[in-house]
Image (spheres, grey):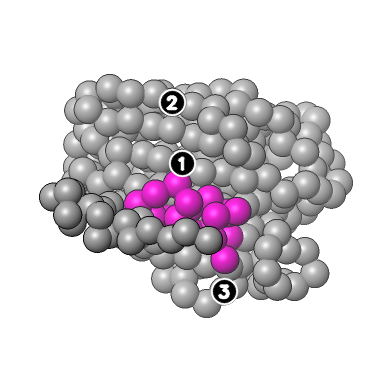
Amino acid sequence: MVSYNVSGLLIALGLTAVQATQFWSNTGTTAGWDTFTHEHEGTVNEVTNVVYKGSTALKMTQIHDSAYSGRYHSEAVKYDAYKKGDTAFYGFAFRLQQDWQFDPAQGFNLAQFIADFTDLGCGEDYMPSTMVWVVGNQLHTRVKYGEVCPISSQKIKSYDNLGQVTAGVWHRIVLQISWKSDSTGYFKMWYDGAKVVEDYNLPTNVGDGRAFSFRVGLYANGWYDHGYEGSQGTRQVWYDQIASGSEFADANPDGWS
């Protein structure tokens, strides 16, 4: 077998090697997160019976309650996932429960970047930028740009019907985002290994430069925004191999262990 000293060759040629860096990772455990959201009867549990890779996964559950008027978050939270000007990859594997009810089609969020803007005093509080969600059996994502205040100046570009989601099957998401508030940003998304979004020369973040957190988990926003529909009052999503880094392999659920 022939081996090469690539680093030495690059130095001899006056070049610099670009090193991949995994910023953070989680193998489907409750350890290492900054906090969790457990609104109302929602739960975030570490399990061993349903996993994508390794021996553990996170199971997020939300339960509808007709007497409750609040939101339905069950998420694991990583603070300071990005600031304006950053570029990074983000990835995770997810699995909807085996009997997930797709019809009627309602929205359920799977992951989001979010920051608190309450201090601006314009009526905005926790505002998400990019989100990944399902409506019916179709996957969607978005970017948000413009200014936070007034709220009417916030702009959204959505990418819809990016692929079918199958209940009881593990799926993989990888995002690459250059977070810019001007037209120099870009946004890419891979679904189960296939690139489904590649968009350049666009704003991908609001003008405010504060840090956004990354939340992975179930947010039953359809129940809050549009009212309960269908007959499945308990929703469950599993998550595994969650990571961020400077290269695709750092965030790809199949690229690290």
Depth check, front residue: 119 or 114: 114
Label 1 CA crowd tier, 10 Å (few <14, some 14–19, many 20+): many
Q: Position of residue 83 (x, y in %)?
A: 25, 50
Q: Quadrant of residue 39?
A: bottom right
Kind of residue indicated by mark 2: Glu
| Secondary structure of residue under mark 2 | strand
Q: Which residue is mark 1?
A: 175
Q: Quadrant of residue 203?
A: top left
Residue 234 numbered mark, or none: none
Q: Earlier in the sequence, mark 2 or mark 3?
A: 3
Which mark lies nearer to you, 3 or 1? 1
Q: Position of residue 74 (x, y in %)?
A: 59, 59
Q: Image point 68% across, 69% down: which residue?
A: 54
Q: CA distance from mark 3 to mark 1?
A: 23 Å
Q: Position of residue 253 (x, y in %)?
A: 58, 54
Q: Which residue is mark 2?
A: 198
Quadrant in which the C terminus appears? bottom right
Kind of residue indicated by mark 1: Leu
Look at the picture and state if 211 lies above or below 103.
below
Side (left or right) of 95 relative to 218: right
Label 2 CA crowd tier, 10 Å (few <14, some 14–19, many 20+): few
Q: CA distance from mark 1 to mark 2?
A: 10 Å
Residue span colored magenta: 241-257
Q: CA distance from mark 2 to mark 3?
A: 32 Å
Depth check, front residue: 1 or 109: 1
Residue 233 visible in the current orientation:
no
Kind of residue indicated by mark 3: Thr
| Secondary structure of residue under mark 1 | strand
Which mark lies nearer to you, 2 or 3? 2
Q: Earlier in the sequence, mark 3 or mark 1?
A: 3
